[in-house]
Protein backbone atom coordinates (compact mmCIF):
# COMPACT_ATOMS: atom_id res chain seq x y z
CA UNK A 1 0.00 0.00 0.00
CA UNK A 2 1.24 3.47 -0.93
CA UNK A 3 -0.21 6.76 0.24
CA UNK A 4 -0.60 9.27 -2.58
CA UNK A 5 -0.66 12.99 -1.79
CA UNK A 6 -1.98 15.61 -4.21
CA UNK A 7 -1.23 19.33 -3.91
CA UNK A 8 -2.50 22.58 -5.49
CA UNK A 9 -4.25 22.15 -8.85
CA UNK A 10 -3.49 18.39 -8.90
CA UNK A 11 -5.70 18.04 -5.80
CA UNK A 12 -8.37 20.26 -7.38
CA UNK A 13 -8.50 18.20 -10.59
CA UNK A 14 -8.60 14.83 -8.82
CA UNK A 15 -10.85 16.01 -6.02
CA UNK A 16 -8.87 14.37 -3.22
CA UNK A 17 -6.00 15.56 -1.00
CA UNK A 18 -4.75 11.99 -0.54
CA UNK A 19 -5.58 8.34 -0.98
CA UNK A 20 -4.06 4.94 -0.32
CA UNK A 21 -3.62 2.58 -3.25
CA UNK A 22 -2.37 -0.89 -4.01
CA UNK A 23 -0.26 -0.98 -7.14
CA UNK A 24 1.78 -3.34 -9.27
CA UNK A 25 3.75 -0.40 -10.67
CA UNK A 26 7.52 -0.52 -10.27
CA UNK A 27 8.19 3.13 -11.18
CA UNK A 28 6.41 6.44 -10.67
CA UNK A 29 5.68 6.58 -14.40
CA UNK A 30 3.92 3.19 -14.26
CA UNK A 31 1.93 4.38 -11.24
CA UNK A 32 0.83 7.46 -13.17
CA UNK A 33 -0.29 5.24 -16.07
CA UNK A 34 -2.40 3.17 -13.66
CA UNK A 35 -3.95 6.33 -12.23
CA UNK A 36 -4.66 7.79 -15.69
CA UNK A 37 -6.57 4.63 -16.56
CA UNK A 38 -8.85 5.00 -13.50
CA UNK A 39 -11.00 7.82 -14.84
CA UNK A 40 -11.05 11.19 -16.57
CA UNK A 41 -10.10 13.21 -13.46
CA UNK A 42 -6.76 11.41 -13.22
CA UNK A 43 -6.21 11.54 -16.96
CA UNK A 44 -6.61 15.33 -16.88
CA UNK A 45 -4.46 15.80 -13.76
CA UNK A 46 -1.62 13.72 -15.19
CA UNK A 47 -1.95 14.79 -18.84
CA UNK A 48 1.30 16.81 -18.84
CA UNK A 49 4.05 15.32 -16.68
CA UNK A 50 6.37 18.19 -17.59
CA UNK A 51 4.14 20.43 -15.47
CA UNK A 52 4.40 18.16 -12.42
CA UNK A 53 6.96 17.32 -9.78
CA UNK A 54 7.01 14.15 -7.72
CA UNK A 55 8.49 13.13 -4.39
CA UNK A 56 8.88 9.68 -2.86
CA UNK A 57 8.95 9.71 0.93
CA UNK A 58 9.62 13.48 0.79
CA UNK A 59 12.61 13.24 -1.58
CA UNK A 60 12.26 14.83 -5.04
CA UNK A 61 12.65 12.22 -7.77
CA UNK A 62 12.14 11.78 -11.51
CA UNK A 63 9.16 9.92 -12.96
CA UNK A 64 11.41 6.95 -13.80
CA UNK A 65 12.29 6.50 -10.10
CA UNK A 66 11.61 3.05 -8.63
CA UNK A 67 8.80 2.65 -6.13
CA UNK A 68 10.58 -0.11 -4.20
CA UNK A 69 9.90 0.39 -0.50
CA UNK A 70 7.98 3.64 -1.05
CA UNK A 71 5.40 4.53 1.59
CA UNK A 72 4.33 7.90 0.20
CA UNK A 73 4.28 9.52 -3.24
CA UNK A 74 3.42 13.21 -3.58
CA UNK A 75 2.45 15.02 -6.79
CA UNK A 76 2.59 18.82 -7.04
CA UNK A 77 3.23 21.63 -9.54
CA UNK A 78 6.70 23.22 -9.69
CA UNK A 79 7.19 25.86 -7.05
CA UNK A 80 8.23 29.37 -7.95
CA UNK A 81 10.07 31.76 -5.71
CA UNK A 82 9.34 35.37 -5.17
Image (cartoon, rainbow, N blue to C red):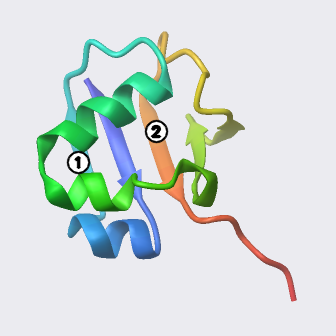
Position of 25 with respect to 48 (left or right) is left
Residue at disc 1, secondary structure: strand
Q: Residue furthest bottom?
A: 82
At label 2, counting other C-alpha atoms closer than 10 Å, the crowd grade (few under 14, some 14-19, many 20 or more) is: many
Label 1, label 2: how far apart the Cα atoms are: 10 Å
Residue hosting label 1: 19
The residue closer to the viewer here, 81 or 44, is: 44
Residue located 25% across and 39% down the image: 35
Position of 7 with respect to 19 (left or right) is right
- Measured as percent of width and height from the top left, residue 38 is found at 13, 42
Residue at disc 2, secondary structure: strand
- Measured as percent of width and height from the top left, residue 32 is found at 37, 36
Relative height, residue 62 to residue 74 (above, below) = above
- Measured as percent of width and height from the top left, residue 63 is found at 58, 32
Residue hosting label 2: 73
Residue located 62% across and 42% down the image: 58
Relative height, residue 55 to residue 11 (above, below) = above
Q: Residue furthest right?
A: 82
Q: Quadrant of residue 81?
A: bottom right
Q: Residue furthest left?
A: 39
Position of 35 with respect to 79 (left or right) is left
Amino acid sequence: MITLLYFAWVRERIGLPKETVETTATTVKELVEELRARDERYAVAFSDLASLRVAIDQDLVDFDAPLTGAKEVAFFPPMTGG
